[in-house]
Every structure is written in structure tokens, then in C-alpha cells.
Amino acid sequence: MYAQVIETGGKQPKRPDEMSAEEKAFMQRIENNEKIEPKDWMPEGYRRTLIRQIGQHAHSEVVGQLPEGNWITRAPTLERKAILLAKVQDEAGHGLYLYCAAETLGVSRDELIERLHAGKMKYSSIFNYPTLTWADVGAVGWLVDGAAIMNQVALQRTSYGPYSRAMVRICKEESFHQRQGYDIMLKMARGTPEQKAMAQDALNRFWYPALMMFGPPDSDSVHTAQSMAWKIKINTNDELRQRFVDQTVPQAEYLGLTIPDENLRWNEERQAYDFTPPDWEEFYQVINGYGPCNRERMDARIKAWEEGAWFREGLAEYGRKMEAQRAKVVNA
Ligand code: 3HC
């Protein structure tokens, strides 16, 4: 009965005999693939898990602007600059949709941002790696946005209505992002030997951080079992990572680039690639604040937040004035 049980290292969901009548009715709705909407009854754990995941996701979109924003002034042509600018602006928009989705669960955007700045919330590990060359912008679009889509296409079917609808819109834009990254890689891989070497170097540095985006192996994943029982997550971390590898290897071959993994091999029996897993020690270092750029990223976000205070106050004041004017008209 109810959603499938996934064996992971984390906490297992309640059995039906441990559930209250409300929880059972809720699980039945999940089982029927009904969307849960903000005013519906939901278990407190479901609400908290969503705030954590959607909040982290929103933070990732916003912090994710930094590594690429770094290259807007140095893009090689006017066209590349315009495309990159549009992409970075899209990420800000994605952050906004997601903060709005989180707000429907009873947490304000300011609260979420405060928790991020206080180090109490995470954002995706990937954005703690530096973008050293223009080829890195290509690798980020191709691999990072490619990994993000792999995860987000599945999340379009997540059980919480506002999150699911935000994902539909975000996925459309992410696929453009992935293609612009691949297009940069293609240009560089077919360019001069130096350009091809830059593209290879970017792939070498971003491959494993991209694989880490899917989270720890299922055996160590704290939340997967419960999140899948609630259909917040549709796939496990390892399933999506495998799908990403299977999709990306032929793309690298087409570019004439080599995935930096000597053990990468097509497994006829599994109909999937075997590959060397990421260095999980490094992953935990990065998500616990000790990656190459963690401090730099947080400093930049806190500075932007503080320097933007006058603008937020101005907007709020404008809102108050408009509200007062509307009240006058209504009462006249
Ligand atoms: N980076 C940072 N933290 C990570 C992580 C990563 N790549 N992967 C896992 N973690 C954290 C989890 O948040 C959790 O920590 P917490 O308990 O303090 O919150 C811990 O590691 C254990 O991991 P779990 O597997 O138990 O966690 P989840 O079940 O939440 O799975 C996830 C992790 C797959 C990332 C899931 O949260 C998810 O699907 N999130 C939505 C997608 C998302 O956040 N994407 C961000 C990518 S970037 C992006 O979209 C921007 C685009 O423009 C490129």
C-alpha cells in the first residue's frame, strides 16, 4: 500500500499502522497522484522537507548566477555576451519562482535568505567551483544545466502543486541554457588546438562536480526514502546520476572530448555506462563550507543583500503609497 519503499541509508517513512487518519488520507492522495496545494492539510514533515528542498533550490539559482556573471564583461563577442546576460537573468527569475513556491508553505523569502546567509541552509555544491576560462562557461551550460534539467524534468511531477508548476517553466528555460553551453563547447572543440585543449580542461574540472550535483549515493542519502514516499522526489540520486552519465557520454564523443574517467565503459548487460563515482569526501567538504569558493560566494551574496537594502525599502514604501491611494479611491 502507498508509495514504494526505497532502501537508503536515511530515515524510513512511517508504516501505515503508525499513521494517523489524516496522514493515511494524505498518503492516499499522494498515491492517486493528486497535487497537494498550499491550503490542503499536509504532515509537518512534508512541509518542512519542501521548505528545505525548494529553499535550497532557490538559493542555488541565485548563487548560481555568480560563476557565470563573472564572465559577462569578458564574453568573446557581443552575441555571446547578450546570450550569457539573458541566461544569468533567467536564473534570477528561477530563484523568484522558487522563493514564491516556498512562500506558499508559510516561510518568507527574507527568512530563507537570512538562513542562507547564516550558514543554516545549503545551495548546490557545484557553485563553489571557480570558472577560470571562457570554456568553463560552456562546460557549466552543458554539464551543470544539463544535470539540473535531468533532475528538474523529473521534479515537474513532484507532488506539491506550486513546486511542480514552477518546474515546468524553469525546465523550458534550462534546456536553452544547456544548448548554449553545448554550442560554446562545440565551437571550442572545433577551434584551434589551444581552444580544444581549453574545452578539454573545462570538462576535466567540471565532470565530477557535475556528478556530485545529484547528491550523495543512495546508500548515504538522508532524505530520499521519505521524499520518495511523499513523491517530493520522483527518482533517487543514483538513478538520475546514471541517466546523466548515459546521456552525456555520447555528447562528449560528438565533441571529440574525453570524459576524465579511465573506468568509463558501456555495460551491455545493464544497458548503461559503468563509471568511477565522485570523491564523496570532497563532496562533503564542499557542502559543509570548505569548497574552493564557498566563502567568496557567500561574501558576494551578503554584500549584494546589504547594498540592495535601499532598493527593497524604496519598493516597500512605493507599495505602501499605492495601497493607501487605492484605499482612498475605494473609500471616496
Ligand atoms: N549540493 C549541496 N547540498 C547537497 C547536494 C548538493 N549537490 N546534494 C545533497 N545535498 C545535501 C542535502 O541538501 C542534504 O542536506 P540537508 O539535510 O542539510 O538539507 C544532504 O546533502 C543529504 O542529501 P540527500 O540526498 O538526503 O538530500 P535530498 O533528498 O534533498 O537530495 C537533491 C538532494 C537531489 C539535490 C534534492 O534536494 C533535489 O532534487 N533538489 C532540487 C534540485 C536542486 O536543488 N537543484 C539545484 C541545482 S542547480 C540549479 O538548478 C541551477 C541551474 O540554473 C543550473
Image (tube, grey):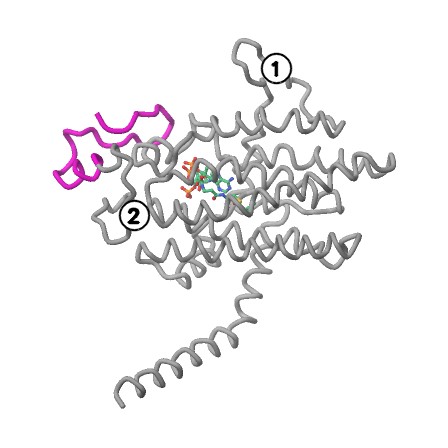
Where on the picture, by quarter, is residue 181?
Answer: top right
Q: Which residue is mark 1?
A: 266
Q: Earlier in the sequence, mark 1 or mark 2?
A: 2
Front-most of 154 and 112?
154
Residue 99 x, y percent position in the rendering: 42, 56
Stretch in magenta: 1-28
In front: 112, or 78?
A: 78
The residue at the point 45 percent across, 45 percent down is 168
Using the rendered view, name the quadrant where residue 282 is placed. top right
**Nearest the eye: 168 or 203:** 168
Residue located farthest toward the top when viewing the structure as drawn: 269
Q: CA distance from mark 1 to mark 2?
A: 41 Å
- In magenta stretch: residue 11: yes
Q: Answer few, some or many: residues within 10 Å of disc 2's Cα (few below 14, many 20 plus, some between 14 and 19).
A: some
Does the segment drawn in magenta span residue 103? no
The vertical placement of 95 against 226, above or below, is below
**Element assignment for label 2:** helix
Q: Quadrant of the C terminus?
A: bottom left
Q: Label 2 belongs to which residue?
A: 47
Q: Main secondary structure of the magenta part?
A: loop
Name the mark on residue 244. Answer: none
Question: Residue 237 at what x, y percent from top left?
Answer: 46, 31
Left or right relative to 73: residue 42: left
- Residue 224 percent across, percent down from the top left: 38, 33
